[in-house]
Every structure is written in C-alpha cells, then in structure tokens.
Amino acid sequence: MSFPQPARHTSPRPGPELIVTEPGSRPHDAFAVVAIASSAGGITALSEVLGGLPAELPVPVLIVQHLDPRHKTVIAEIMARRTKLPVQLAREGDRAEAGTVYIAPPNYHLLIGPDHVLSLSSSELVHFVRPSADLLFESVAGAYGPQAIACVLTGSGSDGGMGVSAVKARGGTVIVQDPQTAEFRSMPDTAVRAGAVDFILPLDEIAHVIAGLVQADQP
C-alpha cells in the first residue's frame, strides 16, 4: 500500500516547530488502536473521518465527542449511518474489538486498560469537560504505547493537548486536523502547540492517512 504524504502546510505556522514522521521511517509494532477527540463542530468532522474508513479496518476506534449531558444522545445512530463500521456507545467492561467504533457516552470519561477492556468513569471534569480527550489519550498511551494513533479534530477549549503529549512520549502517532480548516480551531491549535504532532492534515485526508497507517502491516 502506498502511504499518503505527511502534513502539507498552506501557510507558515507560529509556535513550536512541527516534527513530521514519514510513514515507515521508524520501526514500530503494528498499530492496534485509533483514538479520536472532537468537540464543537465534531459531528460533521467525525462523519467525514468515519465515513472514509474501510469496513475491514483492523483496529478499534475510540471516540470522545463533547456532548450535552442533559440530553439523551443519538450520536451512535448518526455515526452508524455515515460509516461502514459498527458503532456503539461504549459500555463498562466492553473489550475493544477490531473494526468497531466506541463512543464515550455523555458525562462519562472513556478509558481503556492494558487488557484492552473499556471502562467508564464519572470522576471530576478535566478542563471543564467530561468525557475528556486527555484521559482517553493517556489511557490509550499506557495500554498500547507505540501501537496507538491519536487524532484531534475540530473543537473549542484545550482538551487533548496533554493527551497527545502522552501518546507521543510512549512512541505513538499523533494526527491533528489542520486548524485552518477546522470549524473550531482551539483544540487543534492546542494539540499543535504541544509539539507532539506527526501529521497536520485537512479533514478530507485524515481517514486516508489512518487507513494507510493501520493497514500497512497487514498481510
């Protein structure tokens, strides 16, 4: 499989220097999980990314989307209509299965353990939100190390910045939606400023890059 090219910048970017890792430029175990975070504008962005992933995706996808906890959510049903992959709200004790999308339910942090079993927590808010991208990414980093891919999409606030640093510190790969193309750029900007980003991509290229990475080591 041919890999898509790393981030293409349309204009100079302020802040820390971006270090882009060429696909295949470092040894790693096969990727084993994709974790995605989004907030404001995220329904549209998630629809684009999930809709571009192949039905035979060989890894689970874990998602934190900030949702209003006062209302019952239909996000799983919405996303199921946009993707070939099965989609469900995450449940306590679920084992993360390849080719399945798990979305954090409203007002619960989503975590995954070394045994790849999901857990939900109603512990305190992080950066004023629950679920927290930071907590998901940090748990993914601990459970999967260099086998993890973390992706930050459109959103307001700073959630995800600490989490991508944790993923990168454990040897994982970080993808961020180009802030210039994001409906709300605060979360992508925060992730970029963390200096732990491998790819900065327009929204319509993210699914292709994820699929290329996770399928590269498949027979």
Image: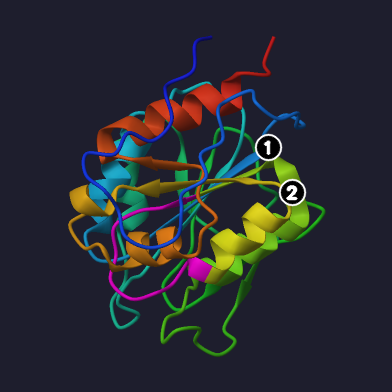
- Residue 86 horizontal side relative to residue 118, left or right: left
- Give amino acid for label 1: Ala
Residue at position x 67%, y 16% from top? 218
Question: Residue drawn 29% across and 39% down?
Answer: 9
Residue 115: x %, y % from top left:
82, 53
* Residue 193 appears anywhere in the view: yes
The residue under label 1 is: 32
As measured in the structure, the alpha-carbon distance from the residue carrying label 1 to the one carrying label 2 is 7 Å
* Residue 151 point in image, percent of width and height: 46, 49
What residue sits 65% from the left and 26% below the top? 25
Residue position for label 2: 144
Q: Earlier in the sequence, mark 1 or mark 2?
A: 1
Q: Is residue 83 above or below residue 1?
A: below
State the extent of the magenta-drawn residues as a range.
151-161
Depth check: give the residue in front, 116 or 202.
202
Q: Determine the residue located farthest toward the right in the rendered image.
A: 115
Residue 56 to residue 138: above or below: above
Measuring 72% from the left and 29% from the top, which residue is drawn there?
30
Q: From where the camera sits, is residue 78 visible?
A: no
Q: Are circles 1 and 2 on residues that touch, CB within 8 Å?
A: yes
Q: Is residue 50 magenta?
A: no
Q: How is the image coloured?
A: rainbow
Whole-percent x and y of residue 44?
Answer: 21, 49
